[in-house]
Image: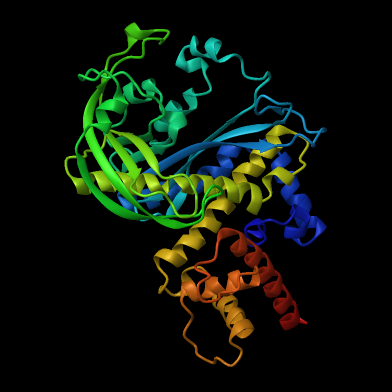
Amino acid sequence: MLLSEHPGETVPQASGNGSNSQSIYRFWSNEKVTKTQILASHREGVVRRCQEAGVVLAIQDTTDLEYTTHEATKGLGYINQTIQQGIKVHSCLAVSVKGEPLGLLHQQSWTRKHRSGKKKERKKKPIQEKESYRWLQTVKEASVGLVEKALVIHVADREADIFELFAQKRCSNSELLIRGEYNRRVKEEMGYLLPMIEQSPTLGTMTIDLERNPKRPARQATLQIRGMKVTLEVPQNHPKPHNLEPVEINVLLVQETEKPADGSQPIRWLLLTTLPIDDFQKAWQCVRWYSYRWLIERFHFTLKSGCGMEKLQLQTRERLLKALATYNIVAWRLMWLTYQARLNPDASCQVVFSPAEWKLLRRKFQPKNRSKKPPTLHQALIWIARLGGFLARTGDGEPGLKTLWRGLSTFYHLLEGSQLVSTS
């Protein structure tokens, strides 16, 4: 709990004293404790929330944890083609169809003893020997415990455009929604995917709100959608083509109708899905669901910038992975708080904060307010964000994760101070 109350601070700062700090370090150093055990109770809660949601987006992506300057840390490996050292992490985050983060469904990590080989050599390897096999493994592992409990839609970016992923057998409650990378061969008359979909009829247009990311500010985009069913041919350069059969799949081409005024790149998504696209509403639903893919990037950003995963100096890879398992839960909770305030702004803040906590917040920002009714969740989190530097001016929009985690840390320091005063 101490770490979730003070995200972004070092373990000694978050712990408050040497005894608590040493307890956390001993926990991560304990050989009897595994990362699976740390995440076990969290995943039970994730499965329960997924079952309540009914339809779940299982969004996966890869990130790097870099520890190049931590020369004393054992067990690290290459994370790219440079000398950088660290750990590669592949995560799968469960998200509701409303955009609410439900928790971590699956995560795997690995290190490279050598830098990646040449591309031609990698292509000759069977999929089970490639790092890209993680996408196929995650589709299987993320569905564990969810069979017949929820419809799981696996969402991923272009790196997951792998023929074996579309060809592999999935659970009956499992669907795919993958952004395409390649102009694949198809059985249809034009022979290739892109010319086929570009000539298909327009299903309709719709406007969507795009969240801010490092490459563009938040903005609205009007999207034109084309869709059709095609049969993907087995890749000609596949090392074992005789083991595979052509795959029928639905394809959507999503393009922005006008050039963005901010100078950013217009949207162009080629989406491959096993979901039905019989009419425009079903096609648009796929597009909207894919637009939530950025949440996995926010999850990794929160782990690194909010929880300070790359600042930890724990001497070994095994200890770092146990810390990662711990901070996975902290990062999810931070995201959950943010989106609860957006999805359920009028709910009572008591779903998150105790009476002592929300009363302290009110005394800080509304000292003359004597109401016994707790503020809304939205109001409470605005106050938390203001402690983190959010100005809450007209036109500032909603607070982001960064101001929220800074504010939470400041708030719990205030709470600890008020408790000390009341007991002295």
Residue appearing at x 65%, y 29% in the figure: 79
Residue 250 seen in the figure: no
Across and down, in percent, residue 160 comes to: 43, 29
Colouring chosen for the image of the structure? rainbow
Residue appearing at x 45%, y 47% in the figure: 44
Q: Is residue 9 toward the left or the right of residue 156 in the image?
A: right
State the residue in front, 126 or 416: 126
Across and down, in percent, residue 191 comes to: 26, 18
Across and down, in percent, residue 353 comes to: 54, 71
Quadrant location, the N terminus? bottom right
Q: Quadrant of residue 111?
A: top right
Quadrant location, the C terminus? bottom right
Q: Quadrant of residue 271?
A: top left
State the residue in front, 45 or 314: 314
State the residue in front, 81 or 17: 81
Q: How many marks?
A: 0
Toward the left, the furthest residue is 278
Across and down, in percent, residue 229 comes to: 21, 30
Q: Is residue 189 toward the left or the right of residue 290 in the image?
A: left
Residue 95 seen in the figure: yes
Residue appearing at x 65%, y 40% in the figure: 322
Up the image or down, 295 lies above or below 146; here it is below
